[in-house]
Image (spheres, rainbow, N blue to C red):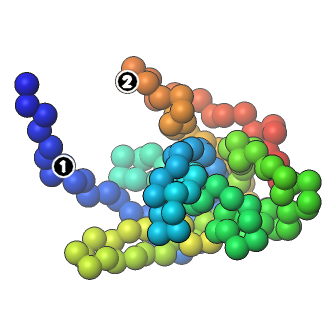
Amino acid sequence: MPLLARDNAQEWELPSEGLHDAVCCDVVDLGESETRWGKRHRVQLRWQLDEETSDGKPMLAMRTLGLSLAEKSTLRPLLEAWRGVRFNAAELKGFDLERLINAPCQVQIMYNVVDDGHTFANVHTVIPPARGRERLIVRYYIRVKDRTDETPIDPTPNDTEDIPF
């Protein structure tokens, strides 16, 4: 039986550029992959935005980062800006990224147009949620680690009791 590969590229609705209210809906462990600095453990943070697609579902934004809290890492300053405080020595020994699930924030989306003309909406900055604004809750999202081929979409909001900041 042949195994056919096809060009099945889809056109995605992009969120508008600028600052969006958001909530972290997933932390995906991508495992180790080859980078220009050698093999690195990578993680993808995913947020639902305050903007909706044409079918009424929350738009998603994602950012892939190295799984490191080293001073020159990309993850550490992103999390420190989001939290509004620097990591202390105890947190630098191990910060559980699962604690980010359901944490509110604002994300800044910036477009990047590549040579072939495709436009990507990139998460440039993550900052604390605006004061006095209603916090978003995760809707219509099943975490990657919990998905199966038979997983129905559950519109039930997740528990927001244990948000770390």
N-term mark: 2 or 1 = 1
Look at the image and tell me in which quarter the N terminus lies.
Answer: top left
Tell whether 85 sits left or right of 68.
Answer: right
Q: Which residue is label 1 attached to? A: 8
Tell whether 86 sits left or right of 68.
Answer: right
Mark 2 residue crowding within 10 angstroms, few (<14) / some (14–19) / many (20+): few
Decide which of 16, 87 is in the foreground and name it: 87
Q: Secondary structure at mark 1?
A: loop
Q: Which residue is label 2 attached to? A: 149
x%, y% of residue 5?
A: 15, 43
x%, y% of residue 26?
A: 59, 44
x%, y% of residue 129?
A: 73, 62
Above or below: residue 40 compared with residue 30: below
Q: Amino acid at mark 2?
A: Asp
Residue 152 in view here = no
Decide which of 99, 57 is in the foreground and name it: 99
Q: Amino acid at mark 1?
A: Asn
Looking at the image, which residue is at 42% across and 75% down?
111
Q: Secondary structure at mark 2?
A: loop
Looking at the image, which residue is at 26% across and 79% down?
115
Decide which of 59, 87 is in the foreground and name it: 87
